[in-house]
């Protein structure tokens, strides 16, 4: 199935159209402007657990001109305000999450970053956990 653009869904970061990109049995929304990804509830976990080898099809890590993050972002589906969180395993990655549907927005490259736990990050997590 070819990628399709859904004009009804605009990127919460830059307002460009989101394009449906297929990865095996999943279909995710990628911004045609900044390259960010909007993932429905649990799609991030499924991509990282089941589709790690094919993440390049979804997250090239290269976006267009990346505008500064907006102070307030709204979910492209629910139009609800999104909250900014830090990933628990990699605190340098900020994730915007919809408080209604649980969908998340990742900047271009962040999904790939989340898939690569570096040795330094693993050691830091080990010492922070007090083991």
Image: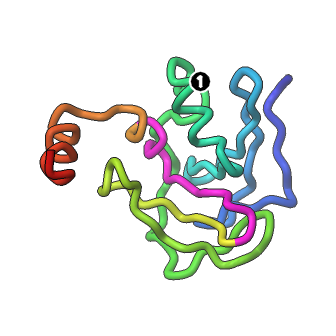
Q: Is residue 19 above or below residue 100?
A: above
Using the image as rendered, state which of residue 66 and residue 85 is in the foreground. Answer: 85
Relative to 2, 71 lies left or right: left
Residue placed under numbered mark 1 in the picture: 50
Q: Position of residue 17 (x, y in %)?
A: 74, 55
Q: Position of residue 58 (x, y in %)?
A: 60, 33
Using the image as rendered, state which of residue 10 and residue 51 is in the foreground. Answer: 51
Using the image as rendered, state which of residue 71 and residue 24 is in the foreground. Answer: 24
Name the colour scheme: rainbow
Q: Residue at x 48, y 66 (%)?
A: 67
Q: Position of residue 92 (x, y in %)?
A: 30, 56
Q: Residue at x 58, y 42 (%)?
A: 44
Q: Is residue 84 above or below residue 60?
A: below
Q: Residue at x 85, y 50 (%)?
A: 6
Any magenta on residue 108?
A: yes
Q: Residue at x 72, y 21 (%)?
A: 24
Relative to 6, 82 lies left or right: left
Q: Is residue 96 above or below residue 125?
A: below
Relative to 7, 87 lies left or right: left
Per the image, label 1 sits on a secondary structure element best described as helix
- Count of marks placed on residues: 1
Q: Residue furthest bottom?
A: 71
Using the image as rendered, state which of residue 86 and residue 79 is in the foreground. Answer: 86
Question: In this picture, which residue range is highlighted in magenta?
Answer: 100-112
Relative to 126, 64 lies left or right: right
Any magenta on residue 47?
A: no
């Amino acid at each position: 199935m070819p990628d399709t653009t859904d004009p009804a869904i605009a990127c919460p970061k830059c307002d460009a159209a989101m394009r449906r990109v297929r990865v095996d049995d999943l279909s995710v929304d990628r911004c045609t402007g900044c390259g960010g990804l909007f993932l429905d509830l649990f799609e991030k976990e499924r991509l990282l657990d089941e589709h790690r080898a094919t993440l390049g099809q979804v997250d090239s890590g290269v976006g267009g001109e990346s505008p500064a993050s907006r102070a307030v972002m709204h979910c492209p589906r629910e139009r609800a305000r999104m909250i900014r969180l830090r990933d628990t395993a990699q605190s340098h990655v900020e994730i915007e999450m919809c408080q209604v549907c649980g969908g998340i927005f990742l900047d271009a490259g962040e999904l790939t970053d989340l898939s690569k736990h570096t040795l330094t990050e693993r050691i830091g997590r080990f010492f922070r956990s007090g083991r």
